[in-house]
Image (cartoon, rainbow, N blue to C red):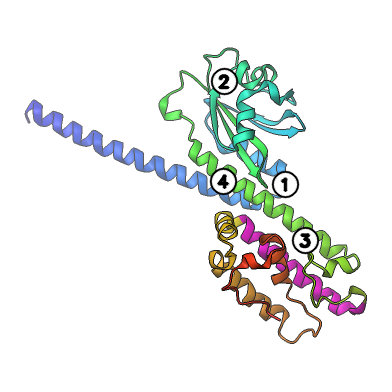
Amino acid sequence: MTLDQSFEALKTLAQSEIAKSRAAGRQSVADSLSLALRRIRQAQNDSDIANLLVHADSSDARKVACLVFDGDHGRIILTRGVPASSVTFPIHNAPALLSVIETRDIVVAQASASELSEPLSKALACVSADTGKAHLIPVVVEDAVRMVLILVQDAAVDPSEAVQPACLSILCEAAALRLEVVALEQIADRKAHFPGPEQLVQIGSTQTGVPRWADLNAAEQSLHLHAQRFAQVAVARMRVEQQAAVRDGQNRRDLYSALRSEIDQAREQYRSQFLAGQSKTMVDYLYLELVRSLANEQDQLLGSGFPGRLI
């Protein structure tokens, strides 16, 4: 075998090994992301979410912290790679953090006191402006930054250990959606377990045909509460899981076209569960919740194609 042939054979082998390595790397990232998303779906509170996000990035080359906010101050609630700390600092002293809060988007800044504030930079062991980069990734709940994940990476880190902001952004968005769903489920649970007087059967201001709570017997009250909770959770899922479609439908004043599949499915489930002759007093709470929660009390925003009330 000539030298050129040997070189070509080595080149082919190297390319094959590189391809295998890339494929393995992609598979590893996909597997890790899938596992993290499954765990996020099981989270029940902010503490669960913070723990999952801080440990989602397993690289030993980075320092990680999760921040929450108390008024105009930020506070570390969990860290990895640095000593645990409960450092509190004024947000106005951290320009990078202010930018995240204002834009609700990922910010990459110098890992320095001038960008992160002196207390935060000290807590993350960032002693100078040339220590590397800080990636700040927000968890946005109800259009407000609920927490921020910070990853600090040394300037001399191996390129293979670089932060993958896209993957972490996906996890933070999934975490935000989970927190919204948990909050809505908790509200529905409280209403179901602690029924008050007539307000429980009066959703919003669109109350045509809604019976008085005192006129319902115990079985009917239970059925009405169940129907209300179904409507609240069904519409909440549309608002949380189909945010872009909801905004589009509101802007075009045609929510039904934007959410036809989801609305039709919810209507069919509501019809079969609550309108199959179980109660002569039943109300279309699904319609009322669509108007209240998605259409901002303006039923015309549902669009001309909306089929109308179920009853």
Q: CA distance from mark 4 to mark 3?
A: 27 Å
**Mark 4 highlights which residue?**
36
Residue 306, position as x, y percentages in the image: 60, 73
Per the image, label 3 sits on a secondary structure element best described as helix
Q: Quadrant of the N terminus?
A: top left
Quickly name the residue at label 3: 188
**Residue occupied by mark 1:** 45
- Is residue 81 in sight in this rendering? no
Pick whichever of labels 3 and 2 is earlier in the sequence.
2
Q: Is residue 12 above or below residue 176?
A: above
Quarter-of-image position of residue 244: bottom right
Q: Is 18 in front, or is 178?
A: 178
Q: Secondary structure at mark 4?
A: helix
Q: Earlier in the sequence, mark 2 or mark 4?
A: 4
**For discs 4 and 3, the disc positioned in front in the rendered view:** 3
Q: Which residues are magenta?
A: 215-240
State the separation of the CA atoms marked 3 and 1.
16 Å
Label 2 CA crowd tier, 10 Å (few <14, some 14–19, many 20+): many
222 inside magenta stretch: yes
Q: Amino acid at mark 1?
A: Asn
Q: Are marks 4 and 3 in contact (CB under 8 Å)?
A: no
